[in-house]
């Protein structure tokens, strides 16, 4: 009559449920709120980071962009041809991490939601 013990090797154990908290992120950003939410009990939740994105406006040579690769954090926006000059073209280069890695509203390792049982001894 052995008990079934789950195989949790390599998993970060995460208490079931969620909460939010506020933190001061410096004088230029101010106070921000962060939400943490586990998956359902027993569900394995994949790793993720918060999305990082931005735009760079630049004059570039299109031959150096290599945008055919769909597994790239960069995408091109608004190519404005400057004619047949060798100086290049004006364009916006969009940087977005979510194109290559899983993103979420939180940073997290691979985890499984559990309920902890704490037995107090007198």
Image: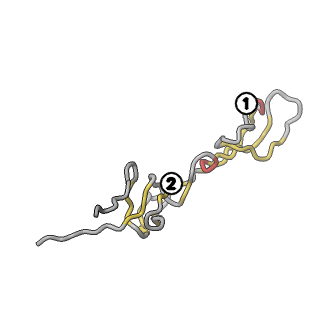
- Outermost right residue: 84
**Spot occupied by residue 68 in the image (x, y as percentages of width and height):** 75, 37
Residue hosting label 1: 64
Residue hosting label 2: 46
**Spot occupied by residue 59 in the image (x, y as percentages of width and height):** 75, 36
- Please give the name of the residue rendered at 82% of the width and 27% of the height, measured from the top-left corner: 86
In the drawing, does residue 20 fall left or right of residue 121? Answer: right
- Please give the name of the residue rendered at 57% of the width and 51% of the height, measured from the top-left corner: 102
- Please give the name of the residue rendered at 54% of the width and 58% of the height, measured from the top-left corner: 104
Residue 19 seen in the figure: no
Front-most of residues 79 and 35? 35
SS for callout 2: loop
**Spot occupied by residue 80 in the image (x, y as percentages of width and height):** 83, 42
Instruction: Look at discs 1 and 2 and give the one toward the viewer.
Output: 2
**Spot occupied by residue 118 in the image (x, y as percentages of width and height):** 25, 68
Front-most of residues 104 and 4? 4
């Amino acid at each position: 009559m052995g008990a079934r013990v789950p195989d949790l090797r390599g998993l970060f154990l995460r208490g079931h449920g969620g909460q939010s908290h506020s933190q001061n992120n410096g004088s230029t950003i101010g106070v921000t709120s962060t939400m943490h939410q586990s998956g359902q009990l027993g569900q394995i939740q994949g790793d993720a980071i918060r999305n990082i994105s931005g735009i760079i406006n630049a004059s570039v040579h299109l031959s150096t962009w290599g945008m055919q690769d769909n597994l790239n954090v960069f995408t091109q926006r608004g190519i404005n041809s400057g004619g047949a000059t060798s100086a290049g073209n004006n364009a916006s280069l969009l940087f977005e991490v979510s194109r290559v890695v899983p993103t979420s509203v939180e940073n997290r390792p691979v985890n499984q939601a559990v309920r902890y049982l704490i037995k107090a001894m007198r």
